[in-house]
Image (cartoon, grey):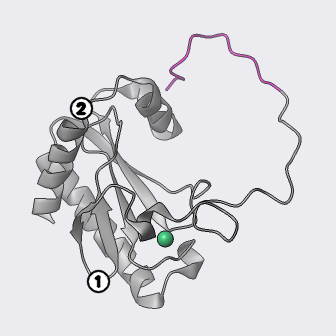
Amino acid sequence: MSLPYAEPLTVRTPAPRVVPEPPRRGEPGGEPCGICTGSAAPPLWGDDHFTLHAPVGSSLPGSLWLASRVHADSFADLPAAAAAAFGPLVARAERAMLSTLPDVGRVHLYRWGDDGAHFHVWMIPRPLGMLDAMGHFLPLWEDVLPAVPDDEARAAVEKVAAAL
Ligand SMILES: [Zn+2]
């Protein structure tokens, strides 16, 4: 595993803390929620609780994100039925990614939630054999590698959606 940057890197001092933190998208005082207002990438699949979306500007075809249908912030805020459906859906999505995308070493699931207050998770396929990108390094590599055309990224997710 390694960072996608030339080394040696140095550890810097964190910036001073900002408290209270600025509002995120979808919070009072913040920008409108892109998912609720429809300005985010449109869903390519959905069920009663979640929708599936293709990324914009991604370097790893098949990367996708799942969002809750309701504007809930975190796992703790999801309605009970959605929380119960989450695990089985992620398992189905992982199987669909592994069966439809070429050369996937492993599928990683990430949830940050720092930009927006609408529950969503990322599922990112690590390219087979790309050991540099194992674990928490994968989203860093995804960020710095050249983006594929959005049509290509969407086509990959459409295959995953069809397999769900
Ligand atoms: Zn929302």
Residue 49 falls in image quadrant:
bottom left
Tell me what residue is drawn at x 25 percent, y 38 percent: 150
Name the residue: 45% across, 28% down.
141
Using the image as rendered, state which of residue 63 and residue 1 is in the foreground: 63
Q: Position of residue 162 (x, y in %)?
A: 10, 61
Q: Is residue 75 left or right of residue 68?
A: right
Q: Residues within 10 Å of mark 1 (few under 14, many from 20)?
A: few
Determine which of the numbered discs, if any, sits on residue 127 in the image.
none
Q: Which residue was labeled with disc 1? A: 48
- Residue type, numbered disc 1: Asp
Residue 86: x percent and y percent? 38, 74
Point 36% across, 63% down: residue: 66
Q: Is residue 15 above or below residue 120?
A: above
User: Mark 2: few, some, or many residues within 10 Å (few <14, many ≥20)?
Assistant: few
Where is 75 relative to 142, above or below?
below
Magenta segment boundaries in residue numbering = 1-12
Disc 2 marks a residue whose amino acid type is Pro
Percent across and percent down for residue 110 are 47, 53
Q: Which residue is mark 2?
A: 149
Q: Residue at x 39, y 57 (%)?
A: 40
Q: Determine the secondary structure under disc 2.
A: loop
Element at label 1: loop
- Does the stretch in magenta take in 6? yes
**Mark 1 or mark 2: whose residue is earlier in sequence:** 1
Residue 148 locus on image (x, y percent): 27, 30
| Between 106 and 68, the one nearer to me in the picture | 68
> In terms of secondary structure, what is the magenta stretch mainly?
loop
Quarter of the image for the C terminus: give it. bottom left
- Is 111 left, or right, of 108 in this rendering? right
Of the residues tagged 1 and 2, which is closer to the observer? 2
Q: Are marks 1 and 2 in contact (CB under 8 Å)?
A: no
